[in-house]
Image (cartoon, rainbow, N blue to C red):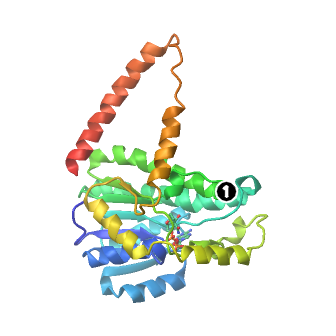
Amino acid sequence: MKDFAGKTAFVTGGASGIGLGIAKALLADGANVVIADIRQDHLDAAVAEMDGGDRVLAIQLDVTDRAAYKAAADKVETTIGKLHVLINTAGVAVVGPTELATHADFDWLLGVNLHGVINGVQTFVPRMIELGQGDHVCNTASMAAFIGSPIPGIYNTTKFAVRGLSESLRWSLMEHNISVSMLCPGLVKSYIYASDDIRPDALKGAMKPVDSETVKRLESLHEFGMEPDEIACRTLEAIKAHWFYIFSHRDHKEELRGIFNEIIDAYVDYPQDAGYEQRVGFEKFRQERAMELRRKWNELG
Ligand SMILES: NC(=O)c1ccc[n+]([C@@H]2O[C@H](COP(=O)([O-])OP(=O)(O)OC[C@H]3O[C@@H](n4cnc5c(N)ncnc54)[C@H](O)[C@@H]3O)[C@@H](O)[C@H]2O)c1
């Protein structure tokens, strides 16, 4: 995707933070933009800030609600046009050791951070394939899709899964001329520390009362996060340059190198077992196909 002018884009979590940043950048680039978010008050404020007239449509949507998602897609088509660009950004966070988390904590985060992305893909990608105009899907993961830590364990789980989905879609959608990218920010100056405000009652479970001290600490930490507008600018440039991995922050390169080195160093040259030759034969076939796809991807850049 070299140009967003005249395209229609759907941005989940588009009422604040990174989503709003990307929505504004797309609008400035000439796209018609739909912002979908669970928070109506933030949608209202975002529409006023964007000031895009009939090139902006706001839809209140809970991305975990599949029927509502389909209705939103239908509304996009009838009011603003067929979709070319899907930006999955809606996300929430809970903080706390994984071993103390409840089923409700897992259900909520997996629902929004993973199933929200799945619902976007399931709803829009078949329509984009049918349209056949060379479209784009950008999924917002996080550096937490690569770096596991003790505290945001559920968040890690959801973001590693978004990475798996995105890595697979990257290759499977190539034949439909749909490019895919995965945005992996570090710390962002955003509102995600206040996720508990929108946690549905049915998924509060045995949740402990929100610790306002922790929320305050997180708020002050997020003050040092990167501005969403800067991330948006880097994201659009990367999409236009046909990059899959979008690392908006320079902060984690050496840490990632350490993780990948540990993975490679964990390989042991065991003696070959009975099925080794056959397995390697099959892997060679698969790897050649993967390399062919990678070569085609690079040609498109
Ligand atoms: N804040 C960070 O430091 C950081 C770092 C890496 C990745 N991310 C990811 O970036 C994305 C955007 O987060 P942000 O930092 O801009 O936070 P944010 O809270 O400002 O934005 C997230 C948006 O998602 C919306 N949302 C939440 N649940 C929803 C639902 N069920 N349906 C529809 N909308 C819903 C929220 O209302 C909010 O507008 C998230 O996926 C987050 O995981 C954030």
Left or right? Give the position of 52 relative to 262: left
Q: Is residue 80 visible?
A: no
Question: In this figure, which residue is indicated by the disc labeled 1?
Answer: 106
Q: Is residue 229 above or below residue 286?
A: below
| The N terminus lies in quadrant | bottom left
Q: Secondary structure at mark 1?
A: helix
Residue sitting nearer the eye, 125 or 178: 178
- For the image, the number of numbered tags is 1
Three-letter amino acid code of the residue under disc 1:
Phe
Residue sitting nearer the eye, 42 or 280: 280
Q: Is residue 189 visible?
A: yes
Classify mark 1 as within 8 Å of ligand 1 or not, answering yes or no.
no
Residue sitting nearer the eye, 182 or 186: 186
In which image quadrant can residue 217 be found? Answer: bottom right
- Please give the name of the residue rendered at 51% of the width and 44% of the height, measured from the top-left corner: 259
- Please give the name of the residue rendered at 67% of the width and 64% of the height, measured from the top-left corner: 95
In which image quadrant can residue 223 be found? Answer: bottom right
Left or right? Give the position of 1 relative to 114: left
Q: Position of residue 69 (x, y in %)?
A: 48, 66
Q: Position of residue 40 (x, y in %)?
A: 53, 82
- Please give the name of the residue rendered at 21% of the width and 49% of the height, measured from the top-left corner: 300
Q: Is residue 201 above or below residue 97?
A: below
